[in-house]
Image (cartoon, grey):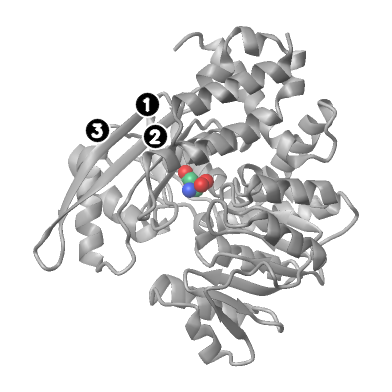
Amino acid sequence: MDIKQYTNDFLDRIIRRDPAQKVFQQAVKEVIGTLTPVLTQNPKYIQEKVLERIVEPERMIIFRVPWRDDKGEIQVNRGFRVQYNSALGPYKGGIRFHETVTADSLKFLAFEQTFKNSLTTLPLGGGKGGSDFDTRGKSDNEVMRFCHSFINELYHHIGYHTDIPAGDLGCGAREIGYMFGQYKKLTNDFTGAFTGKKPNWGGSLLRPEATGYGVAYFAQNMLATRGDGLKGKTAIVSGTGNVGTFAIEKLTQLGAKVVGCMDYDGSIYDKDGIDAEKLAFIKDLVFVRRGSLKEYVKKFPKAEFRPGKKTWDIPCQIACPTACENELHTEDAKLLLKNGCICLTEGSNMPCTPGAIDAFQDAGILYSPGKASNAGGVAVSGLEMTQNSMRIYWTREEVDQYLQKIMRDIHQNCLQAAEMFGLKGNYMAGANIAGFIKIADAMIDQGLV
Ligand code: GLU
């Protein structure tokens, strides 16, 4: 069989079947494009129609979320949960609250999550959920009423052994708290049905830091393959949410100087580097005051605020996109390369467009896909589930040791898988292949379900 022809026909069918689902198509194309050697050596995946099965979520739930705002007016949002694949464990993945959330975007994110969770080495299936509700500009009470209404429907479908949601964009400890509270009230059951809980009621220490720290550890592992390290390197982290702030923190602790980051309003360029004091200011701004990075330059006037501008023109050696999908385009990639970038570690899900990825790979710099390098968050979610089951808490140091080991193992597994199939040093292929084989074999073992 001509494998190239088979995968091309397969992708055509996906596009014909759901022509409007652009980001999902992009994610599937990226994965399938790297599986040719695996399919060639293992015809069982074709005979068992694993590709055809893996691109269909096991279940998608769409529901109405009515709630009342502070003025007493009724608002109606749409809620979703994509229970994508449970071959390796219960569905696991975050909840995104943002106006851009659609069934398409969550189906794509759930697909990515399934591969990412497979890479964590933990027994986790893949899922994702959310709503087109935007937490920005809402009062705590409005957020609470919305979260309670969201759970009034979602609680039927989730549970400790079934589906364990966590946070994502627009959904942090506050939202998890409100959702967990309502879940507990409705089920009369205090279990670890959510992760990303606060440590005083069941959360794991280091869970908030985990994705960002994991990104920095992954970059460190990649650089080590070239006898290099983070010490003295100039870095850029695009987002300043949960992933970005903690990536800045760990990169700095490991010796890099982070000179740029951004939010919805624009970016900052701070040549002196964002040290611990400046980062504390950003964290307070983002997580407590929910303000804009514009304020950074008022406090630190030597830095520059660039309204509406992204970070990619700022010269750096290490770049970590941590904002959202398709935030880094071909022209941005070319600019980064021209300015001396040697390592691109994705912190968000599919932040680089296919053209940008090609540019990095053609240039031969270190490039890692988010499903490998941002897996630290969901990995510590897995550790939170373990601690909940055992009814114990591990110390920060213990969790950090596990996190470092998991990131090392993911890195190693990507390298090994890539090398085994003749694609040495290609982290994207390695992540897709290692993630795929584990899920595909489990699906075959479990038969047609
Ligand atoms: N939303 C995060 C991710 O994209 C974390 C998911 C989780 O902890 O379940 O991986």
Asked whether disc 2 touches disc 1, contact meaning CB atoms under 8 Å apart, the reply is: yes
- Residue at the location (19% across, 48% down)? 149
Q: Nearer the viewer, residue 297 or 206?
A: 297
Q: CA distance from mark 2 to mark 1?
A: 6 Å
In the image, residue 36 sits, relative to residue 172, either above or below, namely above
Q: Secondary structure at mark 3?
A: loop
Q: Nearer the viewer, residue 340 or 158?
A: 340
Q: Position of residue 415 (x, y in %)?
A: 79, 37
Query: In the drawing, does residue 376 fall left or right of residue 138?
Result: right
- Residue at the location (75% across, 59% down)? 334
Q: Nearer the viewer, mark 3 or mark 2?
A: 2
For residue 156, which numbered disc appears in the image? Answer: 3
- Residue at the location (69% across, 51% down)? 356
Query: In the drawing, does residue 58 fall left or right of residue 221?
Result: left
In the image, residue 7 sits, relative to residue 203, either above or below, namely above
In the image, residue 95 sits, relative to residue 136, either above or below, namely above
Sequence-first disc among 2 and 1: 1
Residue hosting label 2: 82
Crowding at mark 1 (Cα within 10 Å: few <14, some 14-19, many 20+):
few
For residue 284, which numbered disc appears in the image? Answer: none
Query: In the drawing, does residue 216 fall left or right of residue 182?
Result: right
- Residue at the location (79% across, 61% down)? 337
Q: Is residue 151 visible?
A: yes
Residue hosting label 1: 59
